[in-house]
Structures are given as structure tokens and as C-alpha cells.
């Protein structure tokens, strides 16, 4: 029983406590409705916020929108809870916001009626909101107050508005001279955490010379204020532009693709990543024509502010050397459309070049330019050459006037015998443009073509050459024999000597010269015998005959010879004529004797 | 009387010789004109006539090759360039045109696919024409004989330098005689031939009943191994051997 009483008491207390608490929490629940913009364009969207805050204990359903002339594009929600203990009394405040994105369908002024929200058993009503739909939305300055109360750095609501992410191009100048360099900075202003993915296709910059000078700078997000609003900005790109036309030129719009990161509004959901594209609006640039340059001035085409320096590599030249004049133009501006200064003619001085090297944005510094011109001098003769100064005229857009700079004058001493060796040349490689067989032979030989190895004369010549060796050899042997043995030589010569005398005798016999006949016959026979018998020449007839008798046994032959020789001695000195008959017989006798001698010896 | 007759005969002989060269020059000029005016058929017929009249002339072979090339007969063009080179292996124009014409054959003939040393050797071997070699041999031989004669004359003064001179001349003679002999052997035993038909099938034996081995096209240079009436055994540069019809190729040998 006691147990039952206790239970009844406890249950009563508990019931009372619940009623007390319910009354306590139910007392301060606040429901409100508001929009981010009261005036919107027909094509714009706006947001309707329904906020429920207070000590909510019971569950409630998502508020239902009444029938309104707006298109509901979607709903998102966020909630937060804060607990505070004041004077020992704990209060828990829960805040739930429903965000509806709405799009107007018609123009005019509309009112959103009070929205009924059921929380537990109680019913709450929001205030009504008036919306004006115009053709164009209100300017961006009319920001709803709610935005400034954002506590986080980035906006976290799911709906991105047009002015939340702005991509703009800002030119450094909008009115300038032709060929004057200016810059266009592309910056994105965002209220969201944003990551640029890529730039859209490069638009065509008509009438501009263009260079991207963004460099490899890191994309950094900076907190900035723009149009009186707090934004985060990323400087994406910097272009250097120089107009090459006059008039009104347009910098085309540029598209940027980026990812917007919307963090999760509760612990268990992931961050939302959305791809968006934003565009810059085209910018009009007014380009003025440069004023006419003063007369007699050679305008180089450079616009900006420049300095000039010049340097000659050598002032004394030896044979075969060349000097190099280096002219450096540096400063702020564009040097791409610049004409190179023309070097004036100097007699006997060959000028080659210039070899040019143009650099822009040196050390990533904007609007800096440098052009190095190199002229090579090749003196054709010895002497002192005056290298004149060269003018360089540019237009200064700040001072709005033409300024002429001059290089220094140089003197160049060249020694005798300079051989011009070109280091700069315009020579090109020869390229084959077609191929074909070679042309026919027109002046051919008609003699035909003979293979020499098949020719008889060739082998005949070879054979002759071969035979000449043994011939020479045997000839040489014979010569040696003769030179070593005089007697042998004489015996070999004997017959030849005899023949010579016999020729004389026969000549004398024919012409009836009797004295001549006997004389030569006598001499011939004696000489023949001395040679043959190897007796010293000039031996007497008797000594010869005695030697001969030892050699020849035929006595009759010797007798005959002796009588003939006697006859010869008798007649050769006699002046009296000899009978024809006599000489005729003697001629035949001589023949017989000679025949007999040659046979016997 | 006798003298007069002799004079007439001699003058007639020279006149005929002169008139023969005169007509040849006329023919040559006609051919040149025809070639210049792109009438290659006419030029070819004149050159062929000249070829019969003036036997063995590398320039005429070269010109005939050019005509065939222009008439798009690559096989015959290659054949005639080859003929010109057989007579005069240092004929630079024929060499150049042969290499050019070889690019137009359907079969790739990769003769450059040799190592450096062997290609250098073969190029040097054919660098001098047969006649140039003959002249070099003759001059060297005369020099040798001359120095031997000098030795015979001055038998008592055999100096060291003279001996070295003699030895080097002997060595040079041996080298050039050997070179010439091998070249003359190649000239006499030229087995090379060029395919003149557009497409030729090669079989494993003399007859179409044998297995078909490979197909060759006009302009391919090959070596004849054996001729057996209508069929010929051939070998290609890549080592392939087979039998083709004798009528489908033309021998390079003159």
C-alpha cells in the first residue's frame, strides 16, 4: 500500500513539473519572415527567410508557403542552438531558418501573406512581406541588413546571388594614345569561398597588341572592400595591351569558371561544391592618334619614356677585326612596334646589322622594356672613321611631346689590311624543290668505247717492254766483253774494216781510179790481217806474212796473196796508167784472196 | 698511175669515214632536240640506231637509260644505266641516275644495308673504271721497266733509296695488276640482270607446276645462276633463289 501512495505522489510531482516547464518554454517562441531584397527585377531571384527562434521543445514541420505569385526554386535550411545559464536558470534557444529562393513571374507589387507554422499544439504566424517586382532590380547598394550580421567569413547559404561573385576587368587607362601600353587587371570579388578552375577561351583582342604578364604569381585571396561592401578578392591575371588602331576599341569580355565551396550547415553533411561561370563586361577604350611629329624628325614609333645608351667594343682595329656598336634603349613603354634607327652611310665603312634583342617586363616589372641593337663595323681600308651619333625619337604621352635622344659619337682607328669577314649574313640554306634524273650527254665520243685490256697494241706494248729487259741485259754483257778484251774487239771489228776498204776498191774499179784501187786494197788486207792475227798495227808486210805462214798451211794461197800485195805496192805509187784488163783481173784476184782468207782465218 | 689510184682509194676511205661521223653528229643532234622537246620515243629510236653503229659507248647507254626512264620503263632504264657503268664504272651521271631510278622500283633494294668497311671496300673497288686501271697499270709497268733499265745501266751503284723505289714499284704493280685482273674477270663474267617485265613470279623449279616462292617487279637487279632454255635460276641480293622465265629479264653484260 505504501508503495502505491508513494507512486501516486511521485507521478503527481512529475506531472506538475512537466506543466511548469511547458509553460516556461512555450512562453517565448518568435517567428518572423523577411526577404533579402524588397525590390527585385523580373529576371532576378530573391530569398524569403522564415526564422523560428526560441525555446522550442516540440517538433515542428516545415512551413508551407501560401499561394503566392512566385516560382519556388528550392528551399534550404539552417539551424543553431545556444544554451545559456542565467541566475541558475538554464535557457536553451534554438534557431531554425528556412530559406526559399523565389522568382517573380509578373511585374507589380505583391505581398506575401502571413505564414502559419505549427509548433507542437501551438500555432504561430509570421508577419506579411511586400515585394515590388520591377523591370530592373535595385542597385547593389540596397543590401539587406541581415548580411552584415553574418558571423562567418564566407557566406554559407546555398543560394548564390549575382552580386555575391563579381568578375571584373579594370583597365589602367581608358583614354590613351596609339601604341601606348596600358594594363588590364582581372579580379574576382566573392563572398563565398571560391576556387577559380580555369579561364574561358581567350577572346580576340582586335586592334591590340597583347601580352600576358601575370607571371607565376600565386592566386591569393585577400579581404577587401569594394563598392562599400566587404568582399574577398582574387587577382587572377594582368594583361599588357597596346592599341595599334585609333578610335574606340573594345576589350572583350572574359569568362571565368570557378568552383564555389558552400560549407555544410550541420556536422553530418559534407561541404557543397558548385561550378559557376562569371563574365566580365566589355570595356570601351578611347584611343587617340599621336600628334604629328615635328618636321625633320624620324619618329621611331616608340611611345613611353625611354633612356638611351651606346657603347663601341673597340676603338683600335687590327687586320681582319670588326667593331661592334651596342645601342641600348630602355625604359617604360612598348618597343615592339619600334623601327630600328637607320645608320648613315660612312665611306669605306661596311655596316652590318643591326642584330636586335627586345625584352619586355624585365624582372617581371610591369611596363619595362629594353631593346639592344648591335651594329658591326667592317672598315674596308685603313684610316680614322667617325661614327656619327644616331637619333632615337619617341613620344612621351605624359608630357605629350616628342623627345629625341642621341647616341654618342665614336672614333674608330683601323689598321691596314683589314680583310672583311662577315659575321652577320643573310645567307640561306638551299632547299631542294624537286628531283629528277640528270640530263643526257650531248657531246659524246663517236670513237666507241674500247676496253684497253682487249686491245692488241696494249699487250704489244707490254710485251715490248718485257723483251726490252733481256735485250738490254745481253747488250750490256756484250759491251762488257768488248771493253774488257781489246783483241777480241779487234778481231770482231776486222771484217767490218775489210768491208769498208773493199767498198772503196770496188768504187775505184768502177770509176777507173787505178791508184786508189791498189791503195785501198793493200791497206784493207794488211789491216784485216793485223786485226785477225792480233799483231800490232803498222807492222811491216814481211812480219805479217811470216805470222800468216804459221797460221795457214795452204802455201799456194799465201803465194797468191804475196804476189798481189807486191803488185799493189808496185802500182799504188806509180803515176802511169794501168791497163783495164789488168785491173779487171786484179779485182777478181782480190775477191778470191779475200774469200780464201776469211775462210782460212 | 699507181700513185693516183692509191690517192683516190685513200681519199675515198677518209671521205666515207668523215661522212659517217657527219651523219652520226646529225643523228645525235636530232636526238638531243627530240629529248629537249620531250619526244622521248624519237630520241630513244635514234639512240638505239647510234648504239648499233657505235658499239660500246657508255654515254649512249646512259642516254638510252634516260629515255626509258622518261618513258616510265624503270626496268630498262636501270638496265642501261648498269650497262653504262659496266663499261665505265666511274660514270658519275649514270651512277646518280641509277640511284635515283632505284627509288622508283616496287621492290625495295637495300644495297646500303652493309657495314661501313665492306661498303667502303666495294666503293673503292669500283672507283676506277677498267680503262683507268689499264692506264695506271701501263704507266706503273713502264716506270718499273724504266727503273730496271736504270739498274742495268748503272749496275755498280745500287743505293738504298733506289732499291726502295724498285721494291715499292714492284708492290704497286702487283696490287694494280691484281685489282685489274679481278675487275676484268668481273667484267667478263657479269652475271647481273634486271627484271624488265612488270611482275614476275619465281618458282622453286623450272616450271609453273613448282611451288611459287616469291614475286618480283620491274627494275629489280638480280644475279643469273643458271640458264635452262625458257627458265633461269636467279638469286636476289637478300639471298632468295628461284626460277623465273628467261624472257622476263635482260642481262646487263654487253
Image (spheres, coloured by chain):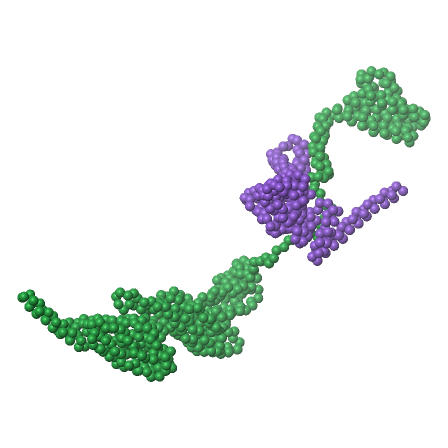
Chain colours: A green, B purple
Residue at the farthest left position: A2
- Where, by quadrant of the figure, is residue B205 drawn? top right
Q: Nearer the viewer, residue A57 or A76?
A: A57
From the image, which quarter does the N terminus of chain A lie in? bottom left
- Where, by quadrant of the figure, is residue A540 drawn? top right
Residue B66 visible in the snapshot: no
Find residue A589 and report its horizontal and vertical position in percent: 89, 23
- Where, by quadrant of the figure, is residue A433 drawn? bottom right
Q: Nearer the viewer, residue A304 or A183?
A: A183
Q: Nearer the viewer, residue A490 or B38?
A: B38
Residue visible at 77% across and 25% down? Answer: A492
Q: Is residue B50 left or right of residue A433?
A: right
Residue visible at 71% across and 34% down? Answer: A463
Residue visible at 50% across and 63% down? Answer: A324
Q: Is residue B226 left or right of residue A278?
A: right
From the image, which quarter does the C terminus of chain A lie in? top right
Amino acid at each position: 500500500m505504501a508503495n502505491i501512495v508513494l507512486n501516486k505522489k511521485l507521478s503527481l510531482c512529475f506531472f506538475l513539473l512537466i506543466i511548469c516547464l511547458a509553460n516556461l518554454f512555450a512562453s517565448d517562441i518568435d517567428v518572423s519572415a523577411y526577404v533579402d531584397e524588397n525590390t527585385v527585377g523580373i529576371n532576378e531571384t530573391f530569398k524569403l527567410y522564415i526564422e523560428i527562434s526560441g525555446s522550442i521543445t516540440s517538433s515542428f514541420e516545415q512551413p508551407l508557403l501560401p499561394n503566392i505569385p512566385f516560382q519556388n526554386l528550392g528551399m534550404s535550411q539552417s539551424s543553431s542552438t545556444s544554451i545559456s545559464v542565467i541566475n541558475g536558470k538554464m535557457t536553451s534557444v534554438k534557431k531554425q531558418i528556412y530559406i526559399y529562393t523565389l522568382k517573380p513571374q509578373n511585374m507589380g507589387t505583391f505581398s506575401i501573406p502571413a505564414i502559419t507554422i505549427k509548433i507542437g499544439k501551438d500555432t504561430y504566424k509570421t508577419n506579411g512581406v511586400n515585394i515590388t517586382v520591377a523591370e530592373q532590380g535595385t542597385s547593389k547598394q540596397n543590401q539587406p541588413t541581415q548580411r552584415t550580421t553574418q558571423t562567418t567569413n564566407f557566406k554559407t547559404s546555398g543560394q548564390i546571388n549575382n552580386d555575391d561573385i563579381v568578375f571584373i576587368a579594370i583597365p589602367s587607362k581608358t583614354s590613351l594614345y596609339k601604341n601606348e601600353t596600358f594594363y588590364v587587371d582581372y579580379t574576382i570579388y566573392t563572398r563565398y569561398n571560391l576556387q577559380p578552375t580555369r579561364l574561358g577561351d581567350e577572346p580576340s583582342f582586335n586592334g591590340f597588341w597583347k601580352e600576358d604578364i601575370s607571371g607565376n604569381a600565386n592566386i591569393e585571396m585577400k579581404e577587401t572592400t569594394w563598392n562599400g561592401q566587404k568582399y574577398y578578392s582574387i587577382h587572377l591575371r594582368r594583361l599588357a595591351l597596346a592599341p595599334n588602331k585609333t578610335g574606340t576599341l573594345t576589350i572583350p569580355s572574359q569568362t571565368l569558371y570557378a568552383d564555389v565551396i558552400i560549407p555544410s550547415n550541420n556536422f553530418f553533411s559534407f561541404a557543397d561544391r558548385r561550378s559557376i561561370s562569371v563574365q566580365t563586361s566589355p570595356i570601351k577604350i578611347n584611343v587617340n592618334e599621336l600628334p604629328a611629329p615635328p618636321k625633320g624628325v624620324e619618329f621611331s614609333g616608340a611611345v613611353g619614356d625611354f633612356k638611351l645608351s651606346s657603347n663601341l667594343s673597340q676603338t683600335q682595329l687590327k687586320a681582319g677585326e670588326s667593331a661592334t656598336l651596342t645601342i641600348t634603349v630602355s625604359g617604360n613603354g612598348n618597343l615592339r612596334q619600334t623601327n630600328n634607327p637607320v645608320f648613315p652611310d660612312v665611306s669605306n665603312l661596311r655596316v652590318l646589322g643591326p642584330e636586335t634583342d627586345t625584352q619586355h617586363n624585365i624582372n617581371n616589372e610591369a611596363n619595362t622594356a629594353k631593346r639592344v641593337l648591335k651594329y658591326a663595323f667592317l672598315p674596308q681600308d685603313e684610316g680614322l672613321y667617325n661614327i656619327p651619333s644616331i637619333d632615337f625619337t619617341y613620344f612621351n604621352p605624359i608630357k605629350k611631346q616628342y623627345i629625341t635622344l642621341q647616341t654618342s659619337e665614336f672614333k674608330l682607328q683601323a689598321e691596314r689590311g683589314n680583310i672583311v669577314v662577315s659575321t652577320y649574313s643573310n645567307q640561306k640554306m638551299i632547299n631542294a624543290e624537286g628531283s629528277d634524273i640528270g640530263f643526257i650527254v650531248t657531246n659524246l665520243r663517236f670513237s666507241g668505247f674500247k676496253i684497253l685490256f682487249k686491245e692488241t697494241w696494249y699487250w704489244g706494248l707490254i710485251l715490248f717492254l718485257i723483251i726490252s729487259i733481256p735485250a738490254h741485259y745481253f747488250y750490256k754483257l756484250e759491251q762488257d766483253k768488248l771493253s774488257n778484251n781489246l783483241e777480241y774487239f779487234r778481231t770482231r771489228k776486222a771484217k767490218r774494216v775489210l768491208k769498208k776498204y773493199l767498198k772503196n776498191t770496188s768504187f775505184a774499179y768502177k770509176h777507173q781510179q787505178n791508184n786508189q784501187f791498189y791503195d785501198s786494197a793493200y791497206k784493207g788486207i794488211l789491216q784485216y790481217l793485223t786485226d785477225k792475227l792480233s799483231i800490232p798495227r803498222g807492222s811491216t808486210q814481211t812480219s805479217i806474212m811470216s805470222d800468216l805462214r804459221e797460221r795457214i798451211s795452204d802455201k799456194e794461197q799465201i803465194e797468191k796473196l804475196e804476189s798481189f800485195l807486191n803488185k799493189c805496192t808496185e802500182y799504188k805509187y806509180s803515176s802511169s796508167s794501168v791497163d783495164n784488163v789488168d785491173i779487171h783481173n786484179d779485182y777478181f784476184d782480190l775477191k778470191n784472196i779475200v774469200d780464201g782468207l776469211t775462210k782460212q782465218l | 698511175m699507181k700513185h693516183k689510184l692509191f690517192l683516190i682509194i685513200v681519199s675515198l676511205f677518209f671521205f666515207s669515214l668523215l661522212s659517217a661521223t657527219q651523219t652520226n653528229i646529225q643523228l645525235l643532234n636530232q636526238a638531243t632536240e627530240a629529248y629537249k622537246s620531250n619526244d622521248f620515243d624519237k630520241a630513244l629510236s635514234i639512240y638505239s640506231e647510234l648504239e648499233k653503229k657505235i658499239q660500246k659507248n657508255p654515254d649512249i647507254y646512259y642516254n638510252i637509260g634516260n629515255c626509258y626512264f622518261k618513258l616510265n620503263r624503270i626496268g630498262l632504264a636501270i638496265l642501261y644505266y648498269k650497262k653504262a657503268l659496266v663499261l665505265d664504272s666511274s660514270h658519275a651521271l649514270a651512277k646518280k641516275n641509277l640511284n635515283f631510278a632505284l627509288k622508283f622500283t616496287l621492290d625495295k633494294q637495300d644495297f646500303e644495308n652493309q657495314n661501313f668497311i665492306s661498303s667502303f671496300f666495294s666503293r673503292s673497288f669500283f672507283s676506277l673504271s677498267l680503262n683507268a686501271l689499264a692506264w695506271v697499270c701501263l704507266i706503273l709497268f713502264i716506270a718499273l721497266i724504266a727503273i730496271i733499265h736504270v739498274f742495268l745501266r748503272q749496275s755498280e751503284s745500287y743505293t738504298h733509296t733506289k732499291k726502295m723505289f724498285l721494291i715499292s714499284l714492284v708492290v704497286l704493280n702487283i696490287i694494280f695488276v691484281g685489282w685489274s685482273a679481278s675487275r676484268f674477270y668481273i667484267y667478263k663474267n657479269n652475271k647481273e640482270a634486271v627484271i624488265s617485265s612488270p611482275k614476275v613470279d619465281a618458282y622453286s623449279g623450272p616450271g609453273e607446276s613448282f611451288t611459287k616462292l616469291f614475286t618480283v617487279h620491274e627494275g629489280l637487279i638480280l644475279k643469273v645462276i643458271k640458264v635452262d632454255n625458257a627458265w633461269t635460276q636467279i638469286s636476289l641480293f637478300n639471298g632468295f633463289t628461284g626460277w623465273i622465265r628467261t624472257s622476263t629479264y635482260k642481262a646487263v653484260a654487253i
